Image (cartoon, rainbow, N blue to C red):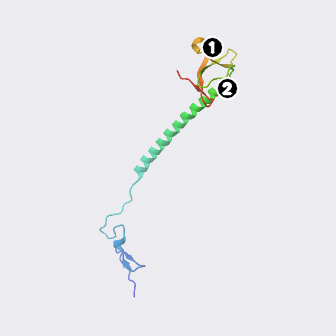
């Protein structure tokens, strides 16, 4: 038995010694549609832009949260290092002032009742941190 070479446009499975064009998921004859790879450049560029925008937005949110947390840390540091002769009550508003000597003190007296150098008003939260009261 001689093996004759089959033409290129005929699908012949050498191992099984059969024609298997009907099993292929693509066209095998000369008149079959051309197989063209899809150009995904535009899709990739849109996806990259969307991902970059999403990551940048998340970064800005985290940066804002970090800056807010650092401001709270600084205020808490100043308040805990300030002078006061009473035990603050949770939920009450207190006022932080500067003395002429440069030292800070915490007071129950509101800024409209005195002439001290007012830094800000704060209230003590349940978790023992100070939150700035916005006007």
Label 2: few (<14), some or many (≥20) within 10 Å?
Answer: some
Identify the residue position indicated by label 1 in the image.
Answer: 116
Count of residue discs: 2
Comparing 55 with 116, the one in front is 116
From this view, report whether residue 4 is shown above or below residue 110.
below
From the top left corner, tell me how far across and down residue 77 is, in percent: 66, 27
Instruction: Name the residue beneath numbered marker 2.
Output: 80
Q: Is residue 4 left or right of residue 109?
A: left
**Which residue, as the protein is rendered here, is positioned at the far left?**
31
Q: Which residue is located at x 62 percent, y 23 percent?
A: 89
Q: Is residue 72 above or below residue 19?
A: above
Give the vertical position of 128 relative to 111 (above or below): below
> Quarter-wise, where is residue 21 in the image?
bottom left
Between circles 2 and 1, the one closer to the viewer is 2
Separation of marks 2 and 1 at Cα, in angstroms: 19 Å
Secondary structure under tag 1 reads loop
Q: Nearer the viewer, residue 88 or 25?
A: 88
Q: Position of residue 43 (x, y in %)?
A: 41, 50
Residue 88 in the figure: left or right of residue 7? right
């Amino acid at each position: 038995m001689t093996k004759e070479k089959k033409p290129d446009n005929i699908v012949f499975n050498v191992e099984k010694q059969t024609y298997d064009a009907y099993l292929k998921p693509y066209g095998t004859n000369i008149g079959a549609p051309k197989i063209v790879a899809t150009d995904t450049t535009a899709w990739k560029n849109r996806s990259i832009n969307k991902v970059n925008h999403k990551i940048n937005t998340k970064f800005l949110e985290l940066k804002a949260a970090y800056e807010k947390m650092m401001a709270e840390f600084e205020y808490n540091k100043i308040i805990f290092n300030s002078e006061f002769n009473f035990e603050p009550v949770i939920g009450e508003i207190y006022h932080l002032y500067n003395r002429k000597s440069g030292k800070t003190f915490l007071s129950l007296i509101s800024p409209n009742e005195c002439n001290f150098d007012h830094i800000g008003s704060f209230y003590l939260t349940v978790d023992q941190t100070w939150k700035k009261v916005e006007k």
